[in-house]
Amino acid sequence: DDRSGGCGGGGGGRDKGKKTGDGEGSKSAPLAPSVPPSQPQTTNSLSYGAGERITVLHVAEKPSIGQAIARGLCPSSDARSAGGRGLPVYEFTGPSFPKAPKASSCNHRVTSVAGHVFSVDFPQQYQSWDSVDPAELFRAPVQKKPCKGSVVKHLQDEARGVDFIVLWMDCDREGENINFEVLDCCMHLMTSGYGGGGVGGGGGSAHYDRVYRAHFSAINPSDIQKAYRALGKPDRCQSLSVDARQELDLKVGVAFSRFQTRYFQGRYGDLDSAVLSYGPCQTPTLGFCVQRHLEIETFKPEPYWVLDLGVLQRGKMCRALWDKGRSFNQNRVLGLVKTCRDAPGGCRAEVTSVVTKDKKQGRPTPMNTVALLKACSKALGIGPHAAMQTAERLYLSGYLSYPRTESTAYPKSFDVAEALREQSGDGRWGGYVRDLLGGGPNKPKGGIDMGDHPPITPCRSAGPHELTGDMARVYDLVTRHFIASVSHDAVWQSTRVSLEIEALGDQGHFTISGKKVRVVTVVAHYLSCLSIISSR
């Protein structure tokens, strides 16, 4: 019984009662360790395939995710080529399938697509610029066309005769849309089931009961297995919302591109552009950039003056700030300087008050995508596009959780202590993390759980030389932020010294401010390290 774990032969065979059409029954494949099935099951009979061998096709959004899924379910799984299409297939026997726990064994195939399988476009009769008015495009039908025909063929080849399909796309709207693109290609090729008359019987819709969707936010083995044990269903509503957005983007983009291209070509005969494209998102964004650029270009700088007071204390010069701030009247400021110099007995400043207070520096809220991009730009000097690419590489390598999230609160199921333990051996912050675990992590600062993905966190430790360049800097930033988010607030001692130059009357008030850490926590360390990280 392969359900209890262990490794051995087996693989792509098909037992009695079903037709397959794949002809790979004699091929052997490695076995994966057992992953306990999840309960309860509501969308499929638990008796499906009882005593028989079943086949499950897993489809990921990218080849790298497919590899991680295969390694997470069976570390010894091997890849085979898929007809030269660049989409490897990993095959292994076991673990038992949570939705058919009574099957004698389970053959798994793990493959992927490469993003969207289909794109949306107008039918051929609307492709002509000359015969179709741009306004007519808003009423025109649209159709989906394969991005690459080879991907469709690949999915159909691998899905033929399988019992179950598990979709492992990114857990966002685009991922849900790709889920249904995959199903449109191959769901009708699933087996009809035991006694159902072979492949495809009953129509594709009858097979939806044996289609599942995995929800995951990281691709380390523990998260992969957790998602495998808690399979759900794909969300048709989210997929339809992407269909609507794609249709709007197409119609608005094409209609306005044709309209403005014709308009400007007719107005400017020497216009050096065949097409002036319009993007529903890009063009308004360009408008904001142009508006800000014009504001900068037309800005006329106006000089201003401030009165500085230098205070020499213990061999160090401190700058006292003028309470009046900036002045656009140069003669006024120079007059005050002359008054100081001409004062009888010289210019003397008297300390009028010293106020010392303790102030808390609150821990940061958990990091979402916007916070990540802002921190990378401000602290690391990495632009949003490059920062997102770096974060996605770290995610695909298993170092970070999924970087596209709107949530700023950890879900109740998130194991803070386990995530911290991953960092306890790091030479940079491991000692602090061990102390934090000993005293118990602090409750994260309140945020909002949007229900899409948890905030961005490190998934595993990375040694100081394991990552390089921007990947090391972004990982460092995210990890410090995570540790700070579950730490105790820092306490600063803030001191404000007020000084007065009597000769200047109400124009002679100055202030020196400073602060130092009184209760050291990683929050203060994280905030002070932002500038250190940026210099690396």
Image (tube, grey):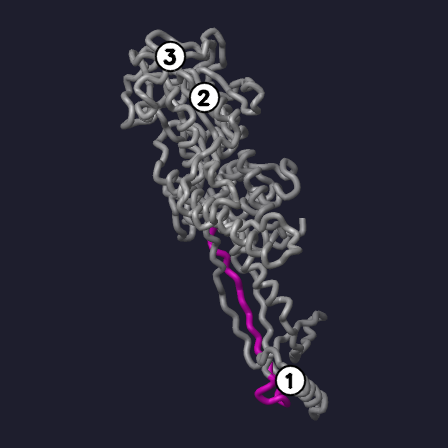
Q: Earlier in the sequence, mark 3 or mark 1?
A: 3
Check disc 3 and report its element: helix, strand or loop.
strand
x then y, percent, for residue 323: 58, 79
Q: Amino acid at mark 1?
A: Asn
Vertical placement of 18 versus 132: above or below? above
Check disc 1 and report its element: helix, strand or loop.
loop
Q: Amino acid at mark 3?
A: Arg
- Which residue is under mark 3? 53
x then y, percent, for residue 199: 37, 15
- Which residue is under mark 1? 329
Is residue 420 visible to us here?
no
Tell me the magenta residue range. 486-508
Residue 296 picture quarter: bottom right
Between the C-alphas of marks 3 and 1, the distance is 89 Å
- Which residue is under mark 2? 156
Residue reaching furthest to the front:
131
> Mark 2 or 3, which is nearer the eye?
2
Would you say residue 507 sits in the magenta stretch?
A: yes
420 and 89: which is toward the camera:
89
Residue reaching furthest to the bottom:
344
Q: Earlier in the sequence, mark 2 or mark 3?
A: 3
81 and 470: which is toward the camera:
81
Q: Amino acid at mark 2?
A: Gln
The residue depicted at 35 percent of the width and 18 percent of the height is: 200
Between the C-alphas of marks 2 and 3, the distance is 21 Å
Residue 186 picture quarter: top left
Q: Earlier in the sequence, mark 2 or mark 1?
A: 2
Vertical placement of 151 versus 360: above or below? above
Would you say residue 205 sits in the magenta stretch?
A: no
Number of disc labels? 3
